[in-house]
Image: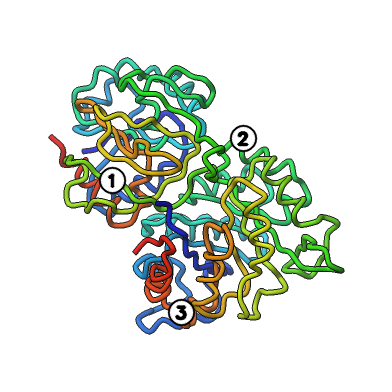
C-alpha cells in the first residue's frame, strides 16, 4: 500500500486517480507514525521548491523521511526536495541525494518552463521495467536536477542533458509526471509499487 | 527532444461537451469523460476544455466535470472560461486540472496573472489571447472577437509573460473558422518575442496547416476543434505526417 506524504504542496487528485485506475491502494501520511502503515512512500509536489520545502519542514516529517528504508518516490518538485539545494528560493533541501537543483538557462535558446512530452533515455532500472528506451513522458518544470552518472537512472535533453530520474538506495525521484504520462507513466507507478 | 503538442479543444456547456462530434465508436458525444478518453487513446498530447456555461451554477458543474475527467484521463488538461479569481483556480486545481486558461479576466485585471502565478506557479497559468487585425495593427479582442480592446496584441502578450504567464494560447480571430491555415506570420513574431511556450489556434483545416505552422514558426503546440471533432483529421494520421516532415511528435 502506497502512502502519500500530505504536506500541502499542490494537488494530488490526479496522482490518486492514477493509483486508483491501477488498482494500487493508497492513503495519506500526515504524521510520523503513519509511515509505518505503508510499504511504499510517494512525495508529490508542484509549484515552488522553496515554498514546498517550507511546508515539508513545517510538517515535521523531514527526519523521518531521511531515515526511511522502504521505497520512496519523489515526483517533480517532490523529486527536487530529495536533493541538497535548489536555486528556486535559494533553499536547502532534504540532502538525501547529493545533487543540485538549478534554473534552466534561457541563454541556451530554450523556452521556460520546459512543458510537454520529451524523450527519456533510460538506464537499466526496475523503475522503468517494461518501458522502452526513449519513451516520452510529460514534463512541466522550470528548474532541473543536474545530470550525475552515480545517481542518474534516466536523462532528458532540454538545452542540455539533465536528470529525468534519479536513485540513491531506496530513494527514487522522477522529474516528469507519471500520473500524466499516458500508459508509460502508469507502468512506472505500477513498477514503483512493486519495488521490494 | 521536446515534442510539438497536438491539442483538441472541447467546448463544454453545463458539464456536457457541445458542438458536433463525429467519432463512430463514441456512445455519448456529450460525455466529456468518454470524449477525453477517446482523444487520449488517439494520441492527443493534451486537452483544453472551454466552459461556455452562462449560468451562475457554472462553477459547481464544472468542478464535477473536471473531477470526472481527472479520474479517467492520463494526459494533462487545461480548463478555461469564467475564471476570475484565485478561488476559481484553486477549486479547479484541487479537482485535478493541470492548467487554467484566463482571457478577459486577465485583460480586465492583469494583476490576476501575477497573483495566480505566485500562488500556483507559472506552469499553471495559460493566458489566452484573441487577436484580430484592425487597421494594420493586431488588437486584443474579447467575447469571441466581438469586443475590441485598446491593447495591442504584441504588447499585451509581452506584459502577460512579464506578469507570470506560463504559456500563451493565441487565437487569430481572422483565421478562426476559415480552415485556411494558422496565422503563421503573427505566431512566428510572438514565439520569437517571448520565452514561454506558445499554442497556435485558429484556422486549422487540413494536415498541411499543422505542418506549416510547425515548420515556419517557433510555436510549441497547435490547437484545433472542429477538424478533430468531425474526424476530418484523425490525430494518428496527423502525427505520422508531421513526423515525415521531421517535426518531433509523440507517437
Q: Chain ID for label 2? A: B
Position in image of residue B75 (x %, y %): 40, 56
* B134 left or right, relative to B115: right
Numbered disc 2: secondary structure: helix
* B15 left or right, relative to A100: right
Cα separation between marks 3 and 1: 31 Å
Give the quarter of the figure containing the C terminus of chain A.
Answer: top left
Circle number at residue B61: none
**Residue lying farthest to the left in this orientation:** A196
Nearer the observer: mark 1 or 2; the answer is 1
Which residue is located at x 46 percent, y 68 percent?
A: B32
Residue bearing the label numbered 2: B118
Position in image of residue B8 (x %, y %): 50, 68
* B40 left or right, relative to B115: left
Numbered disc 1: secondary structure: strand
Which residue is located at x 26 percent, y 28 percent?
A: A151
Circle number at residue A121: 1
Looking at the image, residue B239 lies above or below residue A99: below
Q: Nearer the viewer, residue A122 or B177?
A: A122
Residue bearing the label numbered 3: B233
Amino acid at each position: 500500500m502506497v502512502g502519500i506524504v500530505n504536506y500541502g504542496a499542490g494537488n494530488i487528485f490526479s496522482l490518486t486517480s492514477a493509483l486508483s485506475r491501477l488498482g494500487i491502494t493508497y492513503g495519506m501520511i500526515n504524521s510520523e507514525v503513519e509511515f509505518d502503515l505503508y510499504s511504499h512512500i510517494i512525495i508529490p509536489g508542484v509549484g515552488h521548491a522553496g515554498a514546498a520545502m517550507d511546508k515539508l519542514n513545517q510538517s515535521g516529517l523531514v527526519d523521518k523521511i531521511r531515515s526511511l528504508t522502504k521505497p520512496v518516490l519523489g515526483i517533480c518538485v517532490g523529486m527536487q526536495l530529495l536533493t541538497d539545494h535548489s536555486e528556486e528560493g535559494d533553499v536547502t533541501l532534504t540532502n538525501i541525494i547529493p545533487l543540485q537543483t538549478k534554473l534552466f538557462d534561457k541563454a541556451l535558446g530554450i523556452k521556460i518552463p520546459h512543458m510537454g512530452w520529451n524523450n527519456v533515455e533510460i538506464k537499466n532500472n526496475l523503475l522503468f521495467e517494461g518501458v522502452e528506451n526513449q519513451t516520452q513522458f510529460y514534463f512541466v518544470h522550470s528548474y532541473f536536477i543536474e545530470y550525475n552518472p552515480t545517481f542518474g537512472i534516466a536523462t532528458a535533453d532540454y538545452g542540455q542533458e539533465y536528470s529525468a530520474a534519479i536513485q540513491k538506495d531506496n530513494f527514487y525521484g522522477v522529474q516528469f509526471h507519471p500520473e500524466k504520462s499516458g500508459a508509460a507513466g502508469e507502468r512506472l507507478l505500477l513498477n514503483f509499487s512493486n519495488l521490494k | 527532444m521536446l515534442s510539438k503538442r497536438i491539442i483538441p479543444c472541447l467546448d463544454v456547456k453545463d458539464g456536457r461537451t457541445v458542438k458536433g462530434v463525429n467519432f463512430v465508436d463514441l456512445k455519448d458525444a456529450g460525455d466529456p469523460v468518454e470524449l477525453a478518453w477517446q482523444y487520449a487513446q488517439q494520441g492527443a498530447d493534451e486537452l483544453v476544455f472551454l466552459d461556455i456555461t452562462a449560468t451562475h451554477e457554472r462553477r459547481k458543474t464544472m468542478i464535477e466535470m473536471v473531477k470526472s475527467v481527472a479520474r479517467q484521463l492520463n494526459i494533462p488538461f487545461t480548463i478555461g472560461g469564467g475564471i476570475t479569481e484565485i478561488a476559481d483556480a484553486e477549486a479547479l486545481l484541487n479537482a485535478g486540472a493541470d492548467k487554467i486558461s484566463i482571457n478577459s479576466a486577465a485583460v480586465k485585471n492583469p494583476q490576476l496573472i501575477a497573483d495566480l502565478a505566485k500562488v500556483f506557479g507559472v506552469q499553471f497559468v495559460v493566458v489566452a489571447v484573441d487577436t484580430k487585425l484592425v487597421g494594420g495593427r493586431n488588437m486584443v479582442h474579447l467575447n469571441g472577437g466581438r469586443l475590441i480592446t485598446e491593447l495591442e496584441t504584441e504588447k499585451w502578450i509581452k506584459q502577460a509573460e512579464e506578469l507570470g504567464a506560463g504559456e500563451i494560447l493565441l487565437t487569430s480571430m481572422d483565421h478562426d473558422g476559415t480552415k485556411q491555415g494558422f496565422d503563421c506570420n503573427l505566431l512566428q513574431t510572438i514565439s520569437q518575442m517571448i520565452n514561454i511556450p506558445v499554442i497556435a489556434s485558429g484556422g486549422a483545416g487540413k494536415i498541411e496547416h499543422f505542418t506549416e505552422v510547425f515548420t515556419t514558426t517557433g510555436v510549441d503546440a497547435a490547437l484545433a476543434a472542429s477538424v478533430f471533432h468531425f474526424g476530418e483529421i484523425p490525430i494518428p494520421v496527423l502525427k505520422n505526417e508531421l513526423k515525415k516532415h521531421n517535426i518531433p511528435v509523440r507517437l
